[in-house]
């Protein structure tokens, strides 16, 4: 059974990795925070796992943590989260194994291959997630905010 969320300490080691000290005082180095489901509620249900993949804690609500611990955990989660935001769609072209998307994201221009229509999924609140053939996820936070040409290209394939 996991210890309650408030019975642990979280700090960074000299290398900048997270260290987790459990209620018994056992220190676990190089731990990883992971968001659990639902992903649409990012401030709830976060797991802390050992470098070997063992669950060390499950935090139901990040608001229940002391301020410094919560900020450290949010910072670590932000470093792990990599979901580029699609800002515009320049082209969606038929490719050998699906469709090649040419887009501008919040991290710059890129292109990727989407294997099929099932790789484009709506999320709560109107957002759309697009998963490429390497399982990288891209997010369109609000399709209505895309420029007209981008919306038209998206509507043809979604």
Image (cartoon, rainbow, N blue to C red):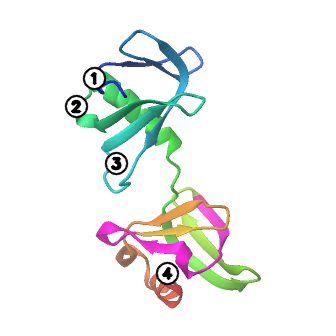
Q: Position of residue 104 (x, y in %)?
A: 56, 67
> Which residue is pictured at 73% across the width and 79% down the height?
97
Q: Residues within 10 Å of mark 4 (few under 14, many from 20)?
A: many
Q: Position of residue 13 (x, y in %)?
A: 53, 16
Camera-side mark, 4 or 3: 3
Of marks 4 and 3, which one's residue comes earlier in the chain? 3
Q: Is residue 110 magenta?
A: yes
How far apart in space, not on screen, are marks 3 and 2 (Cα)? Answer: 14 Å
Of marks 3 and 2, which one's residue comes earlier in the chain? 3
Of marks 4 and 2, which one's residue comes earlier in the chain? 2
The residue indicated by pointer 3 is 42
Quarter-wise, where is residue 52 in the image? top right
How far apart in space, not on screen, are marks 4 and 3 (Cα)? Answer: 28 Å
> Could you tell me which secondary element the residue under label 2 belongs to?
helix
* Left or right, residue 95 beside residue 66: right
Find the residue positioned furthest to the front. Answer: 1
Q: Position of residue 112 (x, y in %)?
A: 66, 69
> Which residue is pictured at 48% across the width and 61% down the height?
85
Q: Do the residues under discs 4 and 2 have CB atoms within 8 angstroms?
A: no
The residue indicated by pointer 4 is 150
Quadrant in which the N terminus is drawn? top left
Camera-side mark, 3 or 1: 1
Q: Which mark is residue 64?
A: 2
Q: Do the residues under discs 3 and 1 have CB atoms within 8 angstroms?
A: no
How far apart in space, not on screen, are marks 3 and 1 (Cα)? Answer: 18 Å
Quarter-wise, where is residue 105 in the image? bottom right
Which region is colored magenta?
Answer: 108-127
The residue indicated by pointer 1 is 6
Q: Residues within 10 Å of mark 1 (few under 14, many from 20)?
A: some
Q: Do the residues under discs 2 and 1 have CB atoms within 8 angstroms?
A: yes
């Amino acid at each position: 059974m996991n210890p309650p969320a408030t019975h642990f300490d979280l700090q960074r080691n000299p290398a900048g990795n997270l260290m987790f000290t459990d209620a018994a005082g056992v220190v676990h180095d190089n731990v990883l925070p992971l968001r659990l489901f639902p992903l649409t509620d990012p401030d709830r249900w976060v797991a802390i796992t050992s470098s070997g993949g063992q669950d060390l804690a499950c935090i139901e609500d990040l608001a229940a943590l002391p301020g410094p611990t919560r900020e450290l955990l949010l910072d670590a989660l932000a470093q792990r989260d990599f979901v580029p935001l699609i800002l515009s769609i320049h082209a969606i072209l038929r490719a050998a194994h699906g469709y090649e998307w040419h887009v501008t994201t919040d991290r710059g221009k890129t292109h990727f291959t989407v294997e099929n229509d099932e790789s484009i999924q709506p999320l709560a609140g109107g957002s759309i997630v697009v998963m490429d053939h390497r399982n990288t996820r891209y997010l369109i936070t609000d399709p209505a905010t895309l420029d007209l040409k981008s919306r038209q290209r998206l509507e043809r394939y979604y």
